[in-house]
Structures are given as C-alpha cells and as structure tokens.
Image: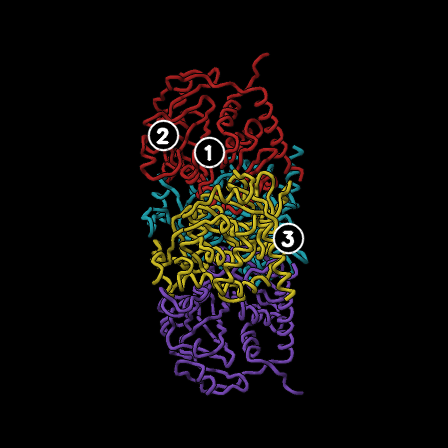
Chain colours: A yellow, B cyan, C red, D purple
Amino acid sequence: MAQWMTLSDAITAFVQDGISIALEGFTHLIPFAAGHELIRQGKRDLSLVRMTPDLIYDQMIGAGCASSLMFSWGGNPGVGSLHRFRDAVEHGWPTPLVINERSHSDLSNAWVAGAAHLPFAVLRGYTGSDLPRVNPQIRTIACPFTGEELTATPAVRPDVTIIHAQKADRKGNVLLWGIIGVQKEAVLAAKHAIVTVEEQVDRLDAPPNACVLPHWVIDAVCLVPRGATPSYAHGYYTRDNAFYRRWDDISRDRATFRAWVQEHILNTADFGDYLRVAAESKRQVASR
Amino acid sequence: MAQWMTLSDAITAFVQDGISIALEGFTHLIPFAAGHELIRQGKRDLSLVRMTPDLIYDQMIGAGCASSLMFSWGGNPGVGSLHRFRDAVEHGWPTPLVINERSHSDLSNAWVAGAAHLPFAVLRGYTGSDLPRVNPQIRTIACPFTGEELTATPAVRPDVTIIHAQKADRKGNVLLWGIIGVQKEAVLAAKHAIVTVEEQVDRLDAPPNACVLPHWVIDAVCLVPRGATPSYAHGYYTRDNAFYRRWDDISRDRATFRAWVQEHILNTADFGDYLRVAAESKRQVASR
Amino acid sequence: MSLPEYTSDEMMTVSAARMLRNGAVCFVGIGLPSTAANLARLTHAPDVVLIYESGPIGAKPSHLPLSIGDSELAETADTVVSTPEVFRYWLQGGRVDVGFLGAAQIDRYANINTTVIGDYGSPTVRLPGAGGAPEISSNAKEVLLIVRQTLQTFVEKLDFVTSVGFLSGGDSRRAAGIRGDGPTAVITDLCILQPRLPDRELVVTTMHPGISRERIARSTSWDLHFAEDCGETTPPTEHELEVLRRLHCESAAAYAAGDGA
Amino acid sequence: MSLPEYTSDEMMTVSAARMLRNGAVCFVGIGLPSTAANLARLTHAPDVVLIYESGPIGAKPSHLPLSIGDSELAETADTVVSTPEVFRYWLQGGRVDVGFLGAAQIDRYANINTTVIGDYGSPTVRLPGAGGAPEISSNAKEVLLIVRQTLQTFVEKLDFVTSVGFLSGGDSRRAAGIRGDGPTAVITDLCILQPRLPDRELVVTTMHPGISRERIARSTSWDLHFAEDCGETTPPTEHELEVLRRLHCESAAAYAAGDGA
C-alpha cells in the first residue's frame, strides 16, 4: 500500500547499505532526484541494476555508493564515455566495481522474468558472442519440444526499485506514458518500490490500456517536481541535452567530479535545492 | 503490407482448407463476421486455436469447418454449455474434433512465445492437475540456475490469425482498445493476419502506448461495421447478451442449429446481410 | 423487527462475500464468484481490488458482468492490461491475495473438476474446461470456492482433477511445491466448509440457518465430518440482501439490453 | 554545374542512407546509424519504418535524437511499446528487415567489438558494451555497419567479440544456427565493403571519390582485398547534402536547448 512521503524519508525507510537496487527509466523519466538522495544519505555497497547506467549511476559510482553493477550499455548517449564508470572498472576508483554485463535483450527479458516470478528467462541471444565466456550467468537451455538450444539467463529481482513517473493520485496509483522502458517490470520484480512523481492529481484520467501501477504494488510515492532532470518527463519538460554534454567535462577528472558532487548534492538539502544551485551553475557557464 | 479488401476476398486469399487458424478476442472484439465468412465459404478441416471458443467456434464446429481445436475454456459465458462443441466432443457430430486442451495461463503464455519467436513458453502451472496426463504437449523443464521444475508448453504459431479492431487508417495501421486480450500476440505469432475493423479513419489519433498494430504486420484489412456482433466493440456498440442467451436454445438441437446456419449464414451474402436477417429474427422472437 | 426472507443462493453469496477482507486483491471467476466479490465491494469491503482474467484490474462494475470481459469491467477499471500480462505479472507474479472459483465437482480435499464428467477420452458430459483455475489455485495466496452442494458436486472421487486443493490432504500440497495456502473455505448453499488440521479434509464449520446436518450429509457423497464447534451461519442482513438484489436487478436489465440494440 | 563540396563523414552517411530500401523496417542504433536512417527517410525512402530500442515504432523525428529515447521519437512514432516488447516481439519476433549498427572494432568477417579494448578483466579502455547489438546482429534479416575506418577500428583480431558478423567466414555463421543474412555492407568514411562469396571476407566494392586504394589499405590492419569490379561511390547529390545538413542544423539547436530550460 503506497504511502505519500518525502523522498528523503522513503530512501531512509527502504534503502539499507548492501541491498540490490534498480533505478530504471530508459533515457526518459530517469529518477535523478532519488539517485542524488542516495548519494546525499551516503549509501554504500549497493548492488546496482540498470540497463543503461547513464549519468545517474555515473554519479552514484563516482560518489562511492556501489560495489557492483548489472547493466547492458554504459555510455553517455550521443556524447561518449561515462568517465566515473570507466574509472571504477579500469582503476577501481573510488572503490572496485564488480560488473555483471548482459545485452539489452537479455536484461529486458530478465526484468520480464522477474515481474512474472520466474527464475529465468529464455531468449535467442548471444550466439557467437564472447559475453557468455565472461559471464557464467549466461547459459543455454534445450527446448523440450524441438531440441533447439536457446539462451537462459537469471531473472532480476532487486530488493528495491525506484522509478520516476508523471502523475499519481491521492491513493498512490501511478500513471506514466511516452517511453515506458522496463519500468512496470522493474517495479513488479522488486520486493519494494518507490515512485517519485511530477505531480499529485485528484484523478489519473488514464487513457485506455495506459501504463498504470496500482497503489498496492508501491511502497512509497514522493512528490518531486522535475525529479528526472537532466533526463526528461514527457509532457512536463525536455531533456537537458546541454547538461549531458557538459557532464563529459565535469566527470572526466576526479577532483572536478568530487567538487561538483560536493557543491550540487552533498551541500544541498534536497532536489529542489539542487535545481536552484544547478541553475546558478548554468548561468555561470553561460556567462563565461 | 496491409491491403484493404473485402472480407470475402481476404478469406479466399489467405484461408485454405486444412490450415491452422486463430480468431481471437477475449469476449470483446470477437471477429464473428470472419467466422461467418469461413462457414459461408465452406472451409473444412481447419485446426482452430482460441482461448475461449465462444459462440464463434460453436458455430464453425457445428457447421463442420473444424477437425481440431486448441482451447482453454469452452463455455457460453454466464449462460452454460457450448452445445455444438459438446456434441462434437461427445458424439463426433458433424465430424470428430481432436482437442488440445490447455489452461488460460498456459495458452496466453504460448501466444507470447509465438509472438516472440520462441519454440516454447515457461510457466508455473498445472501442478497436481490431470491436464498434463491427457495432453502430452504439457511438459516440465528445469531451471538452469535453481534446478526448480517448471512447466514448459509449445508456442502457438498459426498459419492465419484474424482479429476485429475498432479503427484502421488508410495505410492499414490498426488501433484497438479496451479489453485487448491476446490479440497483439495472436497477430504477431501468425504467418498471415487479417483484421476486420469498425471504421476507416484518416488519422488513428492513438493515445500514448496504445495497442497499435502497424500495417506492415498485417496482410488484409476489411471494413466490417458491427463485425464483432453479438460480441461488442468498446466505444461502438454493446454486447448482445440476449443473443448469447438465445444461442442456448438455437444450438441445443442439431436441426434447429442447421436451420439457423442455413438462414443466417449460408443464405446471406455477407455480414451486412446477416445483420438484416438477424434483426428480423429478433423482431419475430420479440413478437411471439 | 422480523428477519428478512432470503433464498439459499442468497445465503451462499452473502457468506462468500463476507470472506473477502477489505483491500484484498481478488482474482475473480465469472458467475457466483463475481457476484460475491462485487457484493463484498458494495458492502463491507469498498477497497477490494477485483482482477478479471480478460484484463481489467481494479474493476468496479455497477452491474454484474454476464461474461468475463464485459465493457463495464474495462470502463470502471484502474487499468486494462493484456490477458498474458494478467496471468504472468499479476497472478503468477504473486500479486493476488484471493482466488475466487466455482467448480462442477469437488472432493474432500477441495480438489476440483471443471473438465469432464466420465472418461476424458469419451466424456458423458464435456464441461467448459480449465480456464484460469489451475494457476489461480496454485498461485493465489488463498482460494475461496463457491459450489452448490449436491451428491453430484460433492463427490468421493473426481472424474478429473482440473485444479488442486490439498491433493491427498495433510502436507501433500506443500510437498508438491505448490505456492499459496490453498482453499481456506468452501461456501455452499447449505453450509461453510473449511480444511481441518492436520489432514486438511473439509469439515462443516457453520450451517446455514434452517439447514440440518442430515440435509448436508445427504448432499455429500463422502462421509462428511462436522467441526466440534460447528455453529450456525449468521443470516444475511437487510442491507446485504438489498445490495445483492439491486445488483441482480441491474444486471438482469443489462443482460436483456442486447435485444433492443 | 559544379559538384558540391562535402566531408568524408557526409559521404559515409549518404552512402549508408542509400542502402536502405523504401519500406524496410529498420532497427536503429543511436549516432551515425540514426543519422543515416533518418536521411534515408527524408530522401528516397519516405516509408522506411524506424524502430528504436527504447520503444518507439515508426518514429519520424524532425531532428536527430541525441539519445536513444528522446521525446521527439515518442511523439512522432506510430506507437511506443515497452523495451522488453521491442526486443521480444519485434526484433526476436523476426519483424526487423535491417539492423543498423556502429562499432569500435571490426574484423575481416564483420564481427564487431563494442565492449573493451584490452583484456576483459583489466581493460585498457572500457567501452559502453553490448546494448542491443548481439541480438540485432543475429535476429535482423540483414545488418548494415557504419564505422570510421582506421588502423584502430579495422583490426586483425578483435579484443572481444561483442556481436557476430560471419564468425570465421564461409558458412560458419549459418552452421552456428544464427538467423539472418548477417552484415551485407560496411560503410566507412573511405569506402564501402561487402562480404565476398564464398569466404565472406569483407572486400572493398566502391571507393569514395578522391580516396585511393593505398589510403584505404593504410587504414586497415589486415591485408584488405578489393573487388575485381571495384568502382567509385557516387558522390552525394546536392539534395542529399541539403537534407543532411538541415538535419544536423536542427539537431544542434535541439541539443543546446536544455541550457535555456
């Protein structure tokens, strides 16, 4: 049963050091506010799951929150590398990062298996690829009818999933639309789910067959306007492409990154405060 | 690539005697017009697939179109038996009917596997049930990670799927909404797909994340207003519950059924003609 | 104030409705289960969540659907998902508290048959079949069964096991690796039966008012036992009957509606 | 009329775009593949269907998305499905005619690496990884690759095989049970390479105008062969360049947009 609460309270209540956690959202609706709050609360030793680590996990990895990462594509889309992710994998900074690497098709199938309470997923994947050689979790299975050999991979069932959505009603029923990625699966596969939303409404007014998550599959709902920034929320604000490009400079160097985290996350009280500080940083960049 | 054509032409072009065929739609949007046209064209020896045979297959089975049936629940919802289905199974009338019986969960998973081009589906099903004893296609499979034993069943991939939908645009892109059942899976699992629709529109105006089938996965689109009668089309007309109840009398007796098929299907030119004759029958029933 | 008059079917439906706690997520079969679940929703359990196998989640119909997929269910639901999603993410996913089922035959361990009377290969009566029952009975956290009690329905041995209750009783259900607690009550037009520990055989725990032990025994093919503290079912209240009858009345109007279309 | 001036990247993108036939269903990676696919859509192939792995099917963006899931893709698509559905029903389901991919390394049999430079356990450069590539390369009916040609990208041996082309050449791809025809062309900033029968080694089939055999050979780590009838790539037309440059211009404006937000 969903409870409305502050994001800070939700993270404190449901996220303990050492748990497995997924913050999902495929380019769209990435729950950045929640990622910042995990950094702000100094969470450690998290087993991260996310198809595309993106800037959100680059920040968390660089800030030392993670001990492992399950993922399928780890770049800054359209820009280049995720420097903090690379630094962790290549040099173990700030702490070593164990990786569990899969393909998009595999990991999205694994989310489906998790939501369906199956222990594994079956797909036509990886043939000829070296990935099964370096990831012993990628196995084969024979079809009991045709004898055909297919790929089997374990389901994903994290302790906590966090997503960002456009709307929730007072009971905590959640509506999202546009690019919905694996968010429904990620919520249903998790033991606990936290949803941050752009707004609270009296009625969802969901179109037929929309992606709705009923309040009874969610633990906490948190009102965080612009909570997906610098990602976007369809119908609310656009993607801050400029920030994605600026991140390349901010994150390339350890000291610059640390200073950014200190100023923008550790020194801010919450995501509203971050947005004010970030807007100020932008003005300074623009006036240079 | 979808071609707009008459239903009669579509059935002639894509349905040959002896093929496997699914007319899907879970209570809602059942493609009755297409079922009638299959009877009208005297198709024989069809391998039918449908979760709920409903009146549409009761009519086709009684008319002698089918040699086998894969299904998961064969009743007249809220009314009772499907008498033609029972007569075929119990007495082989008008021809013997080989049945391949599964559960709803199994068959809907088998549709998913078919759409995903997998040879089999995995589910938590049937434990303790006698169904695997009488259906050798229901087997077990061990999880390669946990060793847990699960149910494996073969995917469904019929030669032809026919569905009814609310709208299509000029190119043949199709939109359906409301109770969407397994229609997307049934279309994507089939070698050929025919869609009958309530109306042709200039623009679909589909809401975000709606159930849209693009024209390039469909072979034929046919304009058949009220083509789901006595089932319903959400937003267009309601279910003819009275007819579902009257069917109990019409279908109970072989001669009465045959007379009904002769008058309403074989003696009518198309579904529009059927609707006129059926309306006349209703008036007679009402005036008795 | 005189007690209201009611039929045995009304007693059965009201008893079944009372079993649903407010807020429970309930996977509803069509017919008696749907009637009972909606009665619960309109009386003591306004926040019960009804899931129908055709796709509606959180349906709040004003009249009883004749079929499992009536438009009323889609229009009043919180959302409508595909049928595979209902079975995969919601039922198998472990999100259903209570599965609400009917049956053509039931045995002493609450195993049920909805497939055939007679031999499977050459049946005397071909019944509709499994539908969602095998997976509802094994994936819902608990199951409620509603069955009219006769010698034909309460049988010594099922002609076919469509869906499991407690298999051969005792711990055999758990030993077979089946999730969920299984049937916690069977509600009939004569009484309420519940599994007795440790053997999990169904025993009568309350008898509906005016129904004798003899009548119940005569309507059961096996040697039926009665709980030591077996009492009387609380009769329907005026409010329960009023809501139930209004539901039926509005439904009858809806069922006839097609005629005028 | 003088020939228009153009860059080698423009020649590459135009060449790649021309490979897409009108009406083809194309699974598009971000970056160069997305640029080429949209150029095709805005020139000779208005009915090409673009599928992005984030969910949009039939996207018709007016500017190039910076990421794989920009709102422009969702807003202009015929429909937006979930990411699992993209990979399960549409790619694995066999509905994709052409997979359009980039790579960090490619070998003579068009196998590609997007995972690591160096050893997997202690990489010199950690690349982004597989994304959709392993299943695109094995489930699409054919694959087009776009890669800038250098000694670092055109290598004798991949540091890691992320996704397969023709494995060890000849019939080895088919023998491994992999669906689809595999890569039918590799488009670079210098030339177009295609698999030669029967060994399926990549050979140069056309060289871009002004590019010499020596330049191409110097940019390739293996002993590269040229087709017997190897000719010159048709240079970009004014129309192709105009559309491509407008696309880039509108995209640059969109990328900068976030700053003002």
Label 1 – label 2 distance at C-alpha: 15 Å
Q: Amino acid at mark 2?
A: Tyr
Evaluate whether label 2 is on the same chain as label 3. Answer: no
- Check disc 2: other Cα within 10 Å, few if <14, some if 14-19, many if 20+: many
Q: Are marks 3 and 1 on the same chain?
A: no
For residue D5, side relative to residue B131 (left or right): right
Image position of D29 with respect to B122: above or below: below
Q: Residue furthest top?
A: C1
Instruction: Give the position of the C terminus of chain B as an image quadrant.
Output: top right
The residues bearing labels 3 and 1 have C-alpha atoms spaced at a distance of: 44 Å
Q: Chain of mark 1?
A: C
Residue depicted at x 57% and y 36%: C65
Helix or strand or loop: what does disc 2 sit on?
loop
Q: Position of residue B85 (x, y in %)?
A: 47, 42
**Closer to us: mark 2 or mark 3?**
3
- Specify the label residue C109 is tagged with: 2
Task: Using the image, tell me which numbered label, if any, was put on residue C101.
Answer: 1
Q: Are marks 2 and 3 in contact (CB under 8 Å)?
A: no
Q: CA distance from mark 2 to mark 3?
A: 56 Å
Residue annotated with mark 3: A236
SS of the residue at dot 3? Answer: loop
